Image (cartoon, rainbow, N blue to C red):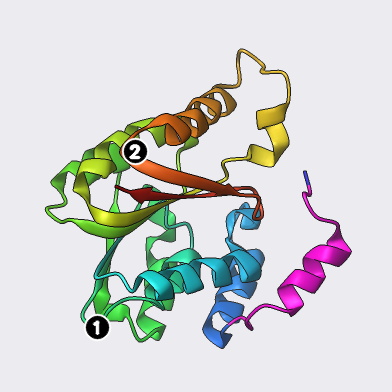
Amino acid sequence: MHFLSDELDNYVTQHSENEPELLIQLNRETHQKILQPRMLSGHFQGRVLSILSKIINPNTILEVGTYTGYATLCLAEGLAENGTIDTIDNEEELFDFQRKYFDKSQWSSQITQHLGDGLDIIPTLNKKYDLVFIDADKENYINYFHLIVPMMNKGGIILSDNVLWSGKVLEELNPKDVSTKVLLEYNQLLKDDPRVETVLFPIRDGLTVSRVL
């Protein structure tokens, strides 16, 4: 589902910050060589992630779902000096692709890749986080959230992607559609959980911003 017309979407993109050259290259190579390139955050959402990270200026970032590393590099733009990013993905074949672009960036030494299941890896990370981006494995969003909230610094921000799920959250639920069912429950959890305050933005496929109280 397109929430904006192509014309309005283009206008929004054209009147937002330009896409950095390294990300233009990453975007292009992802579309040329990697399956499901629509999973890429892309120019507009990337600039949203970048400016949110710059506003927060986090010392520590956790990303669940690296894909080809586009969003990782957008979030890195706001890192505090000597800040770090832990990014988790279970796609072994993407590991070297991600690293190539991380190493081309100024944040190479600050980005740590973790290969495997996020539910196994997150409990091993001995850190408190200022900013988290959840963007993988929709069926485990609720599990990720409950793992992550105790690891957040007060006032930290949790970003959750794809929470409108191509508009499926408004459609009659197919009992076999586990991802949509979980996302419906997750969206209600973010609204009701007293540990966070939340705003859901209709950006791209839906982006929730939750502040830890």
Q: Is residue 165 left or right of residue 108?
A: right
* Residue tagged 2: 145
Name of the residue lying farthest toward the top = 175
Q: Amino acid at mark 1?
A: Glu
Name the foreground residue: 20 vs 195: 195
Membership of 3 in magenta stretch: yes
* Residue 140 shows up from this direction: no
Secondary structure category for the residue under label 1: loop
Name the foreground residue: 92 vs 102: 102
Secondary structure category for the residue under label 2: helix
* Residue 9 shows up from this direction: yes
52 relative to 148, above or below: below
Q: Is residue 197 left or right of residue 116?
A: right
* Residue tagged 1: 81
- Where on the picture, by quarter, is residue 143? top left
176 relative to 49, above or below: above
Tell me which residue sits at (61%, 12%) in the image. 175
For disc 2, the neighbor class at 10 Å (few under 14, some 14 to 19, many from 20) is some
Q: Which residues are magenta?
A: 2-19
Q: Is residue 29 left or right of residue 114?
A: right
Name the foreground residue: 87 vs 62: 62
The spot of residue 93 in percent (x, y) is 43, 56
